[in-house]
Amino acid sequence: MVVSNPNPCPDAVDLSGTINLITLPARPYTVTDLFAGTSTMARLGKGGVGVPVTVTRWDTLAFAITPAP
């Protein structure tokens, strides 16, 4: 999954929000930031799960979402 903030405005600010994962089967997942190398656990339930992110201007984040062991 890739998230970007391509805002060209000179007064652009960081964007914060939540990536909602709802179509994967309910179970634990590992969400890994592929650029930073950090990981967090996300447990998908019946209603899905939200992964909070903040993206600075002109930045792109890339995540791998894999079933947790």
Image (tube, rainbow, N blue to C red):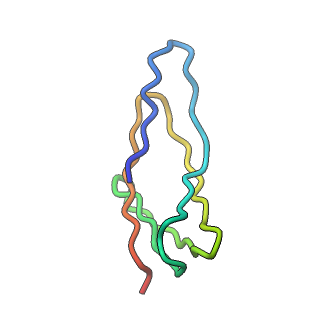
Considering only vertical position in the picture, is 33 above or below 46?
A: above
Question: Of 36 and 24, which appears nearest the observer?
Answer: 24
In percent of the image, x 49 and y 77: which residue is there?
25
Pick the quarter of the image with the N terminus.
bottom left
In percent of the image, x 42 and y 37: which residue is there?
4
Pick the quarter of the image with the C terminus.
bottom left
Q: Residue 46's quadrant in the figure?
A: bottom right
Q: Residue 63's quadrant in the figure?
A: bottom left
Disc tally is 0
Can you give x and y, in whole percent of width and height, for residue 16 in the image? 60, 41
Can you give x and y, in whole percent of width and height, for residue 2 in the image? 38, 48
Question: Of 27 and 60, which appears nearest the observer?
Answer: 27
Considering only vertical position in the picture, is 27 above or below 14?
A: below
Considering only vertical position in the picture, is 2 above or below 49?
A: above
Can you give x and y, in whole percent of width and height, for residue 37 in the image? 37, 61
In percent of the image, x 38 and y 73: which residue is there?
66
In percent of the image, x 55 and y 64: which residue is there?
22
Which residue extends farthest top? 10
Residue 20 horizontal side relative to residue 24, left or right: right
Which residue extends farthest bottom? 69
Can you give x and y, in whole percent of width and height, for residue 5 in the image? 46, 32
